[in-house]
Image: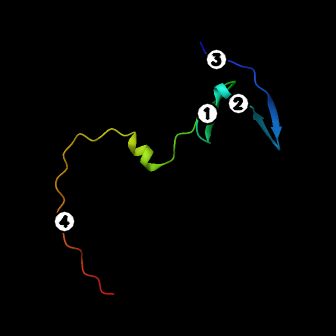
Amino acid sequence: MTAERRVKLFKNGRNQAVRIPREFELPGDEAVMRKEGGRLIIEPAQPKSLLSVLATLEPLDEEFPPIPDLPADSVDL
């Protein structure tokens, strides 16, 4: 069963806003909003940190060939 509650809409400058009750509070400080038909859907935004994205990836299950550690090319300064 989906939780449901009537909420208040109000104007914030030229934007319409909604008060989100504590029991529906989203984590973080950003959300993603989309409209599907007559429904407005608000979801927590995924973190933008590269480390958090990398942490969600599955490890590769393959062997890579060794990379030779060649000396650096000389540079004239």
Answer yes or no: is residue 45 visible.
Answer: yes
Label 1 amino acid? Leu
Q: Earlier in the sequence, mark 4 or mark 1?
A: 1
Label 1 environment density (alpha carbons within 10 Å; few <14, some 14–19, many ≥20): some
Q: Report which quarter residue 61 is drawn in.
A: top left
Q: Earlier in the sequence, mark 3 or mark 4?
A: 3
Q: Which residue is mark 2?
A: 20
Residue 48: percent from the left, percent from the top?
51, 47
- Depicted 51 relative to depicted 45: above or below: below
Residue 11: percent from the left, percent from the top?
83, 37
- Residue 26 is labelled as 1
Q: Which residue is mark 4?
A: 69
Left or right: 40 as drawn, with respect to 7:
left
Left or right: 47 as drawn, with respect to 62:
right
- Kindly report the distance in space between the C-alpha atoms of the residues bearing marks 2 and 4: 56 Å
Q: Which residue is mark 3?
A: 3
Q: Earlier in the sequence, mark 3 or mark 1?
A: 3
Label 4 environment density (alpha carbons within 10 Å; few <14, some 14–19, many ≥20): few
| Pointers 1 and 2 in contact (C-beta within 8 Å) | yes
- Depicted 71 relative to depicted 23: above or below: below
Label 3 amino acid? Ala
Residue 7: percent from the left, percent from the top?
76, 25
- Kindly report the distance in space between the C-alpha atoms of the residues bearing marks 3 and 2: 13 Å
Q: Residue at x 20, y 49 (%)?
A: 64
